[in-house]
Amino acid sequence: MASINDLPNEILEFIFGLIPPYQDLEQCSAVCKRWASLAMNVQMRKRATLQKGLLDFNLCWRREVLNSQTPSIAARFAHASSLHRNSMYVFGGASSYDTTFNDLWRFDLSRREWIRPISMGTYPSPKAGASLVCYKGRLVLFGGWRHSYAPFQLCTLFDELHLYNIADNRWTIHNLAFGPPPMTGHSATVHRNKMIVFGGYQKTMENLGTSNDIWVLDLEKLVWKRPQVSDVKPPARYGQFQMAVGEDHILILGGTGGVNRIFNDAWLLDMRNDVWRWRNVQIRNKRGTVIHNWSYPACNVGSKVIVLGPTSPNDFQIVRQHRPANQGLHPPNLGRPRPANPGERQRPAEPNIPPRQNPVRPPLPPPPPVPVVPMIPAVPAQSGPPRDPEPRPGPSRVPSPNSQLAQIAGPSRAVPAIRSPLYRHQQEDDRMLPKRFNEAPSEHGHMAMAAFSVPPSNPPPVHASRERQLERLRKMEEKISAMRREQREQQEHAAAVAAAIAAAAVAARHALEAPPVTPKRIKRNGLAIYVCDISQLLTNEEPSIEWQETKNSGLIAGAPDHFTFSTMVSGNGELIVFGGLNKNPKSESSSVTNAIHFLTVPTTVV
């Protein structure tokens, strides 16, 4: 009888890849050495697939729908979270009702459900903005803030140090004689048996503000100390992201130093010598960085740092109206644009005559237009009275003041040739336009006077004009019929193309399990993904990092809403995002969520 062990390694490894890579996969690895090797390959492949998905931007968001029958955590923000084996632990946080929590929750990544451990010992104070790290089966909680109920005081800061034993479900407090001041917004990482704390918003005996100090906690002896640091330091800040680069280096990204002081820089701390040294990190491709690199979740996956943040404004272009340059005066032979109605009378082109130097009389109102009588050629309307001639010297040969001004102004431009009031510069498409019924064709060698608009002496007969008008009407009717026929054919062709596209879309929708992701379906107010490559951080003499180019502004369908003060931890081949605060600038209201999202690589079953 055949069993599962008779399957080849490739098929068995593919089956293990469909199992959640946590407790279930660990139980499979305990069956035999073959299964243990295949389970290890599955975990390694999931991590490599996630890193490749970050490079290719081949990612997908998935929101976990929790069971309503199981307990659920309350909505919160500014909480602390840490990953231990197959669970994500969440402590504290604040709500939208000016309250803080001191509860501890565990999210089982295998069963996808929340569990409230029954803890004992000395509970921490209700607070938010604390740091939480994991070391040898213990959770280390330090610092934080809570809403203050005292007048003229915004919040209360803490310097409490609590340890939580995961196996015993017990809290213990450690009041040390020497240690850092009360703080919040700091960052912490574990290096060997030490916890390194940097920056934060601190309360000292002198003042209350940001800091760039470093504190070291010995996790075995539970003793605080301050190392010797070089004079070159990053600016004081809080809300930054801290990442352990090996055992002897720390990378600091972003943060804020107060109001309108947001940092997008990077610093590297070298802890190999007795005197720790800070080095400013060169940032490449700053266009791909997040614009507000603080209060947003971040974590590292191998040699990549993933930061969630708002959409970059560089991806939105502001369209400015282009004003053409002044080309000067138009040539005399350019008329006004032709009206849309073919039957409307064309105005004659105004010649480009330079302004006169002598004062002129105010223009008289134009005479009323001559009514147009159908089928009878109309006489062109007479123009206004002629302008006064140029002043000439009188009998005494003494020039007038106007002539003196004209001589001072210099020689004037040449006056263009006078054309008929009905003259218009011929264009290429004039043959397609119907002639006006009341315009008679000009005779060869004859030009009417511009001042009086004298019609030609020998007008054409009436019957010849009528035949020409009928011929033009027939041509216009043929042209309109051709245009309607062409428009009807275009509409039929467009309808056929639309039907073909709709049929192809229906076939593709049935062929795929999920509908295709289009930019229209992506929420523009969601969190964007920014990826930073730190593989060249320790290889060169000058440390450098590089932000990768984002696709579609870093937005992916199903992304969480624009929440701040949320947390993100790195699991096995996936990233887990929880909680956050969303402020509405229009209504000045805020909302808090308890949703949990997973960022992973889409899987396809062949």
Image: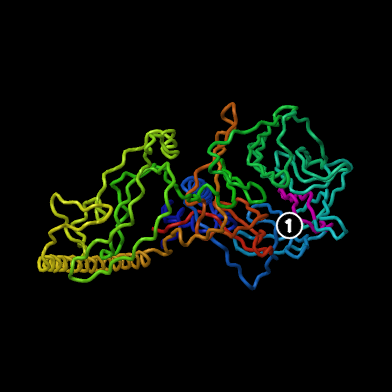
Residue 384 falls left or right of residue 60: left
Image height check: is 169 above or below 398? below
Which residue of the protein is positioned furthest toward the front in this rendering? Answer: 396
Q: Position of residue 596 (x, y in %)?
A: 61, 61
Q: Where is residue 116 in the image (x, y as percent from the top left)?
A: 72, 64
Q: Position of residue 448 (x, y in %)?
A: 21, 53
Residue 36 falls left or right of residue 473: right
Residue 6 falls left or right of residue 436: right
Image height check: is 224 above or below 58? above
Name the residue at 35% across, 68% down.
Answer: 506
Tell whether position 141 is magenta.
yes
Q: Is residue 484 visible?
A: yes
Residue type for callout 1: Phe
Q: Position of residue 37 (x, y in %)?
A: 51, 48
Q: Nearer the viewer, residue 108 or 530?
A: 530
User: Which segment did they paint magenta?
Assistant: 121-145
* Label 1 sits on residue: 91
